[in-house]
Image: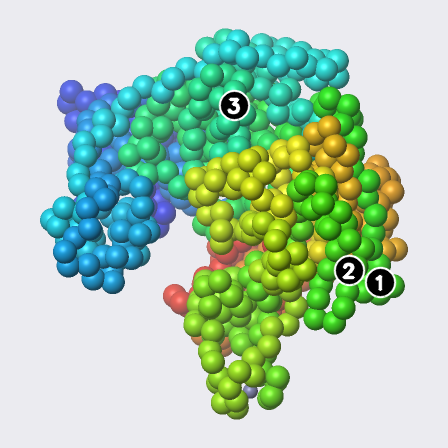
Amino acid sequence: MSRARLIVMNSALGPLDYRVPQGMTVEPGSVVVAPLGPRQLVGVVWEPERLPAEEVGDNRLRNLIHVYDLPPIAAPLRRLVEWTADYYLAPLASVLRMALPSTGALEGARSITEYRATGHVPERLTPQRAQALERIGERQGLVSELAIIGGVSDGVIRGLVKAGAIEAIEVTIDDPFPVPDPDHDPPALEPAQADAAATLRDAVEARAFAPWLLDGVTGSGKTEVYFEAIAEAIRSDRQALVLLPEIALTEPFLKRFAARFGCDPVPWHSGLRQSQRRRAWRAIASGEARVVVGARSSLFLPYRDLGLIVVDEAHEASFKQEDGVQYHARDVAVMRAKLEEIPIVLASATPAIESRYMAEIGTYGEIKLPDRFGGARMPDMAALDMLQDPPPRGRWLAPALVQALEENLEAGEQSLLFLNRRGYAPLTLCRHCGYRFQCPNCTAWMVEHRFTRRLACHHCGHVMPAPHACPECKEEDSLVACGPGVERIADEVAALFPTARTAIVTSDTIWSPAKAAEFVARMEAGEIDIVIGTQLVTKGYHFPNLTLVGVVDADLGLSGGDLRAAERSFQQIRQVSGRAGRGDKHGRVLVQTHDPSARVIQALVSGDIEGFYEAETEARREAAMPPFGRLAAIIVSSEDQAEATETARVIGRAAPRHDNMAVFGPAPAPLAMLRGRHRLRLLVHANRAVPIQDIIRDWLGALQWPRGVRVSVDVDPYSFL
Ligand SMILES: [Zn+2]
Ligand SMILES: [Zn+2]
């Protein structure tokens, strides 16, 4: 090959051709360095016939500079990159970037210098230095990483190195990963589990595309079952990937994995240090990393010989990436399995309607685990009618729930209160003049966080100190909190049970795998009586002494009103209920609601799961909503409101007419302003057979808009804000 066509790592550029100099060999998938003007760019060699570009004469080609000593990106992954870019209307380079690490990892083996605190306190301890040392604690990393952790500049860290408070250490970053032992500690499976495990083992052995829905109630032992499929992949010298919806779940997963296989799998998530990321990437590409557990981005890594993909908690909406390339990791995972010709397991106690439907029509195989492991029963559920038996004024826990908490405390058992709302109160207003605190950048109220004494916007992260006086009428101490967040519930619990030991579990308190591990250890040691948490506590955890779950506001999720609102509420409450009574002790769940007759609440309390799914599925079918129809959202945003509105109108007017397709909008988005940008939405609704990507590509491709306007397309949207 004397010339090569590249996708370069710049999404503004199309495919580019280069000359391959004498003595250099490249093939499709080779990772190379190419010149671009005065700069150098990383690129990947692609099949020219799959990447149409303007032909450039041989004499005008520039030479490739370098080819990395790495295995080429394999054909199935190249096809996945193409499919993802095409399906989600994203630039190829943006998708391909997820398969490549930072340039540091592309280079050969070496050691690097990392830094950590020595414990020595410098003589000159400025507030910045003190803050940095406190936040860094026992963590280790590059100067730039420690600066981010410490919330200071690189200069402050370097100053601390000079002062002897932080020291340099050499780290070899290519230490091999241990190989999990498939026979380390196999569990004794119950008959239903053993059958399920055998089915999946056969699927791994068959080395063919096979999607499986592993549908089992919480506590039925799904993990043990898919671990047997992973064991089979290890035995046959292939790799396995387990996708988890949240980093916070990584730590409990690592523990269970290590107990079964004798060592940790290789983790991949945004919390890794650069050196860890580099080591993991290289081991994944060489095949040495046998089992990888990761967030959605691990889906695009260049596995040398993938034999199995597992998507755990496959119903989770957080598998949908909401910025950059807006892909759904569950759906892309199925496509990767198809291209790699391997089995994939979607595990869930509350499968998405989309997945259940695929099983129903026979596209996916279905494995059901109807019973809880070890004879444990599903918890008893009851609805508490908040109109009939309301809490006292200014409180949020109904008398029946308070009594249940008290009984649990006396019995020495643990309880969990679930409220999917971070902070102290969702809205703060002035009782004197009615002023409400709104985010200056978004159409959203500022949420009070009492621990940090700040008001924060949960959409853009804008924070301000909680003011003493009303900014409008200047009245002092006139601000009141409206409605509860988890912090407020924690206050109420503290007032009711002053001696109870409590913990708040939200993304504010559990922001790293280490924090999650700390929480798990305290729960297991019985150091916590009552947990108050958001959706972060609804999944993955297994605490045998947790016997009571209180759902503080079951109506909360339904207020959003999008097509999945009922399904999502159902899943969330069912998941959190699944935390109760996982050991020998029986569990119970109390659900606070203002509408006990709502279909979701009825289904939860009666346990009529099938009935609920059937009714929801039927409603979707009637409205031709996914999976029976297709949706795509077009979001237009700009700092300039007039520009955004005008562009959205132009797009709306140019909407193509097709049979079985309708375009709604433009209309101001529910979040009409986000991060200082005005937003409008259009929604495309079509029959399954309509090629909406092609239509939208042609439609938007023919239009132009001002530079400051951003137009993004969200195919199969999950958020309608
Ligand atoms: Zn006021
Ligand atoms: Zn905001």
Which quadrant of the structure image shows residue 45?
Answer: top left
The residue carrying mark 1 is: 389
Q: Earlier in the sequence, mark 3 or mark 1?
A: 3
Residue for point 46% across, 68% down: 454
Q: Is residue 306 left or right of residue 603?
A: left
Dot 2 falls on a residue whose secondary structure is loop
Instruction: Tell me the quarter of the image containing the N terminus.
Output: top left
Question: Do labels 2 and 3 touch, CB within 8 Å?
Answer: no
Residue 411 or residue 310, whichever sits in front: 411
Residue for point 39% across, 34% down: 99
Name which residue type carries label 1. Answer: Asp
The residue carrying mark 3 is: 257
The residue carrying mark 2 is: 398
**Colour setting:** rainbow
Task: Give the x, y percent position of residue 253.
Answer: 53, 30
Question: Do labels 2 and 1 touch, CB within 8 Å?
Answer: yes
Task: Give the x, y percent position of residue 630.
Answer: 68, 47
Question: Up-down: is 616 above or below 594?
Answer: above
Residue 174 in view of the camera: yes
Q: Which of marks 2 and 1 is nearer the N terminus?
A: 1
Dot 3 falls on a residue whose secondary structure is helix
Q: Earlier in the sequence, mark 2 or mark 3?
A: 3
Q: Is residue 327 left or right of residue 464?
A: right
Front: mark 2 or 3: 2
